[in-house]
Image: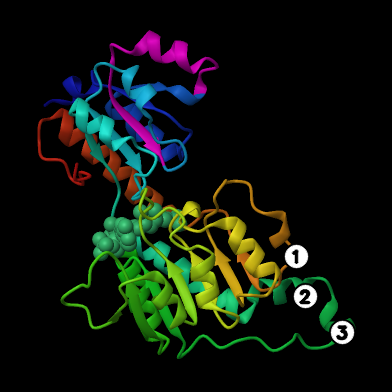
Amino acid sequence: MGEQKLKQAGVLITYLSMPYLIESLDRKFTTYKLYESHDREAFLTQHSQSIRGVVCGRKDGINAHMIDALPCLEIVATSSVGFDKVDLAKCRQRNIAVVYTPDVLTDDVADLTIALMLDALRQISASDRYVRQGLWQSKGDYKLTCKLSGKRVGIVGLGRIGSAIAKRAQAFGCSIAYYSRSKKPDVPFMYHSNVIDLAASSDVLVVACSLTKDTHHIVNKSVLDALGTKGTLVNVGRGALVDEKELVKALVEGRIQGAGLDVFENEPHVPQELYNLENVVMVPHMGCATWETTKAMADLIVGNLEAHFSKKPLLTPVPL
Ligand code: NAP
């Protein structure tokens, strides 16, 4: 399909993404920017006959109501590897293709996981605050922290990101064990058939699985209790994989050692009880938020839409 023909394809952008993605979409397609409209319903009605593609992100996704409002919709592209905010059942029913951005973000999320592990155990952020507040001079050296090298790391969800975390943790001399729906035949790591057993034999429990109705609150009170007072939880998957109320209680009561959190149940709201805990490090869902990866994700979104509207095979389809 020529550039001219491609330009006729109407693509709705639901959220204010980085300029590079918006400019690339503007260049290739006829774009409709939902985030600029004050009346979303009226905007969708007005353009419903022109919109054939939707670009959404991990925060908003696309629900059944919105899909119903777009009768000509053929493809949904989510700028994320998690598609928990896309109504896949509805897309399947309407024969709408769904594409996402796997692989290109794996390294970033795995890198950040190691940073959170190190920070939670060595209390880098807390000791940085100690220095900035002048406490080194007034109170002396910072208290002793915990070693990461050689620890037992348990990974919930040994997928692309989980495997990349395992590779990095191995370089720290950590032993690796994992839980997922089934044992992986060609993986040398210890498999646990349930999360409680994995937690009980881990010093650091890392949550890196997809959020589905089966994995909602996969880390609950029993898992946290199994992790125990010497255990640290790191969550880079999705907030709702962990029962946050129970996590807060476990941290405040000292029933687990610490936590490193990139994701939260009700983002951007974070439990206030965690603000003053030195053994907790929190970052604002920035697992893959680097210039390099965000550009690669944008290129993948545009490439998928180009392929679709040119009737070529999709680059990264979500298996429906
Ligand atoms: P992936 O390769 O598809 O891995 C998903 C993992 O989830 C697999 O290991 C899978 O294990 C496991 N899983 C799925 N359902 C399960 C269940 N019912 N019980 C136990 N395990 C289950 O995906 P990925 O690329 O590694 O990404 C994983 C997740 O990371 C994404 O879904 C997303 O939510 C999150 N993520 C976060 C950020 C961030 O910024 N923090 C960025 C990117 C991605 P089996 O198939 O072996 O059961």
Residue 8 position within the rendered picture, expressed as x and y whole percent measured from the top left? 23, 18
Which residues are the magenta region?
Answer: 36-57
In-front residue for pair 290/153: 153
Q: Is residue 240 above or below residue 188?
A: above
Residue at the image position 78 percent from the left and 71 percent from the top: 132
Residue at the image position 84 percent from the left and 75 percent from the top: 134
Which residue matches tag 1? Answer: 276
Q: Nearer the viewer, mark 2 or mark 1?
A: 1
Mark 1: which amino acid?
Asn
**First in sequence: mark 2 or mark 3?**
2
Residue at the image position 46 percent from the left and 14 percent from the top: 41
Which circle marks residue 139 in the picture? 3
Residue 2 position within the rendered picture, expressed as x and y whole percent measured from the top left? 13, 25
Mark 3: which amino acid?
Lys
Tell me: 10 left or right of 119. left
Tell me: 260 left or right of 55. right
Residue 194 position within the rendered picture, expressed as x and y whole percent measured from the top left? 35, 71
Mark 2: which amino acid?
Tyr
Residue at the image position 39 percent from the left and 40 percent from the top: 85
Quadrant occupied by the C terminus: top left
Residue 120 position within the rendered picture, expressed as x and y whole percent measured from the top left? 59, 74
Which residue matches tag 2? Answer: 130
Q: Is residue 160 above or below residue 153?
A: above
